[in-house]
Image (spheres, rainbow, N blue to C red):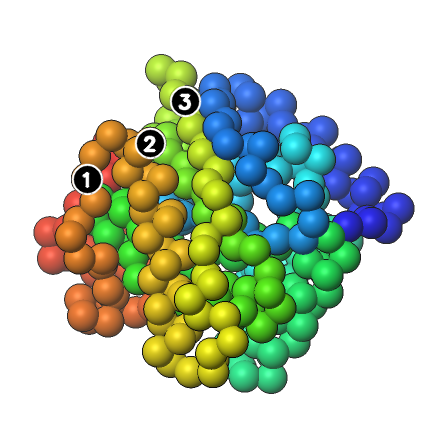
């Protein structure tokens, strides 16, 4: 994607601040970066801590791919932060149908220009007690199937030890390692050409989540749960924080000390 001069300058400024901080906070190991498509694509990572965007953005920027995220619309109204988000063409996500359609349209434009759009299929930090990927939303699948856009699964592990899910402070010492692995584009050919109904979108979303979970399983050297965590079945909200509720019911938050 051809970034504007303003966007390039802003990205350079952000990178000049963030990359040294990330290097100080944790060591890094990136695998599979050669699998990133040359053209536009959707990056679909797991989501287990608030600093995940920095981890994924750092990796993509170092591969000379400017990261464009779908971000909560409210963040665009925050002074300074909102300006940075607009300047780097991040995509505001609104809950209304019209707002959601506009978000997908902007995302399609970014990908059509050869850019990388990062979508967290889970929609928020995983509710799974052990930080495995939970049930995904269908936005990434819909965008991919509508535009014939490749979806690249990404898994990362280790950043949650530096900043635990819903944490309030960083844990820099002893130094931790953040590992990121990029997988092959998800094969969605079985869903191509089908009506974009609930069955199609759910099936494609499950395929994306399976790919992310498989990569994370390799990183962790552990087997994921047989059944993916579903917030609705646990009587949890789909968005926002849930830690207070979890603590009241005895639910632990991995990575906290």
Circle 2 sits on which residue? 219
Q: Is residue 134 above or below residue 157?
A: below
Q: Nearer the viewer, residue 168 or 206?
A: 206
Residue 223 circle label: 1
Helix, strand or loop status at disc 1? loop
Q: Nearer the viewer, residue 242 or 45?
A: 45
Is residue 154 positioned above or below 158 on the image? below
Nearer mark to the viewer, of 2 and 3: 2
Residue 4, percent from left and from top: 86, 50
Compared across the picture, whether 243 is left or right of 56 comes to: left
Residue at figure coordinates x 33%, y 31% from the top left: 219
How would you rate the neighbour count of disc 2 (Cα within 10 Å): few for under 14, some for 14-19, many for 20 or more? some
Q: How dense is the environment of label 1, judged by Cα within 10 Å: few (below 14), some, or many (20 and up)?
A: few
Q: Nearer the viewer, residue 75 or 118?
A: 118
Tell me whether circle 3 and circle 1 mark residues in contact (CB < 8 Å): no
Please say if 229 is above or below 15: below
Residue occupying the far left of the picture: 250
The residue sitting at 17% across, 49% down in the picture is 225
The percent coordinates of residue 211 (x first, y second) are 37, 49
**Which residue position is annotated with label 3?**
177
Residue 170 makes an appearance in the image: no
**Label 3 vs 1, first from the N-terminus:** 3
Q: CA distance from mark 1 to mark 2?
A: 10 Å
Quarter of the image for the C terminus: give it. Answer: top left
How far across and down, in percent of the image, does residue 112 sit?
Answer: 73, 61
Residue plotted at (56% across, 33% down):
33
């Amino acid at each position: 994607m051809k970034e504007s001069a303003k966007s390039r300058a802003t990205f350079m400024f952000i990178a000049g601040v963030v990359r040294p901080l990330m290097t100080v906070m944790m060591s890094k190991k990136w695998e599979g970066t050669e699998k990133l498509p040359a053209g536009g694509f959707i990056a679909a990572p797991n989501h287990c801590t608030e600093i995940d965007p920095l981890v994924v953005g750092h990796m993509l920027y170092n591969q000379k791919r400017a990261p464009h995220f779908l971000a909560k619309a409210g963040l665009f109204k925050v002074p300074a932060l909102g300006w940075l988000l607009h300047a780097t063409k991040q995509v505001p996500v609104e809950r209304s149908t019209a707002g959601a359609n506009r978000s997908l349209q902007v995302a399609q434009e970014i990908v059509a220009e050869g850019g990388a759009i990062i979508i967290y299929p889970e929609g928020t930090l995983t509710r799974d007690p052990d930080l495995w990927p939970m049930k995904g939303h269908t936005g990434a699948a819909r965008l991919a199937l509508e535009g014939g856009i490749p979806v690249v699964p990404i898994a990362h592990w280790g950043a949650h030890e530096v900043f635990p899910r819903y944490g309030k402070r960083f844990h820099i010492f002893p130094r931790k390692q953040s590992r990121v692995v990029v997988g092959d584009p998800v094969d969605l050919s079985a869903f191509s050409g089908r009506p974009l109904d609930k069955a199609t979108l759910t099936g494609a979303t499950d395929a994306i989540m399976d790919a992310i979970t498989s990569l994370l399983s390799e990183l962790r050297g552990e087997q994921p749960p047989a059944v993916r965590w579903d917030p609705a079945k646990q009587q949890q909200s789909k968005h926002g924080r849930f830690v207070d509720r979890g603590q009241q019911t005895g639910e632990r938050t991995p990575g906290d000390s």
